[in-house]
Amino acid sequence: MFQTLNSFFKVWDVEAGATQKILNQLTDESLLQKVTSKNWTLGRIAWHTVTAIGVIASRTDLSFDSPNQDYPVPTSAKFISDSYRQASSALSQAVKKQWNDKSLGEIQEFFGQRMSNSDLLFFMIQHQIHHRGQMTILMRQAGLTVPGLYGPSKEEWAVIGMDAPKM
């Protein structure tokens, strides 16, 4: 996917920023929101998004400090948001200091598949996007305002006095 570290950082900075915007909106009460008793709570998805950074990166030779245990799920939304900020920054710093462009082509074993470091980084971004979608649904169910990520959200359109575009 990525041919250079700079190409990764351009995408990572945008996507990590979008994930941070979502996590910053969470409240302690909202962490308990779930669709059904058989599904993960909003807090569980949020914490998993944080810990996955370290879990995925651990399949490479990158070394940095990051939470990597999904349990127990913290009860503080601020702790989850702060932990994401730390983990996403630590990943960026580790990639900058420990890899070069050639490192992106190195092959790793990842859950039974052989993937390049570049593909693992892209997977990490896709993984966050996937879980952000889940979190936004649960956020709306919990009565939270969903921030716009790739343009204004429904709530942001309403603030500026316009209807969201019809699909």
Image (spheres, helix red, strand yellow):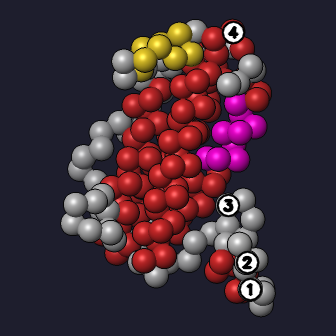
Magenta extent: 8-16
Q: Residue 13: horizontal and vertical position, in percent?
A: 69, 43
Residue at 65% across, 78% down? 154
- Mark 4 vs 3, N-terminal side: 4
Q: CA distance from mark 4 to mark 2?
A: 45 Å
Q: Is residue 58 magenta?
A: no
Image-based side of 92 in relation to 61, left or right: right
Q: Amino acid at mark 1?
A: Asp
State if disc 1 and disc 2 touch (CB < 8 Å). yes
Asked if labels 3 and 4 touch by Cβ distance under 8 angstroms, the answer is: no
Closest to the camera, between mark 3 and mark 1, is 1
The numbered mark at residue 166 is: 2
Closer to the N terminus: mark 4 or mark 1? Answer: 4
The location of residue 57, given as percent across then percent down, is 47, 26
- Residue 102: assigned label: 4
- The residue indicated by pointer 1 is 163
Picture residue at 44% right of the left edge, 29% below the top: 56
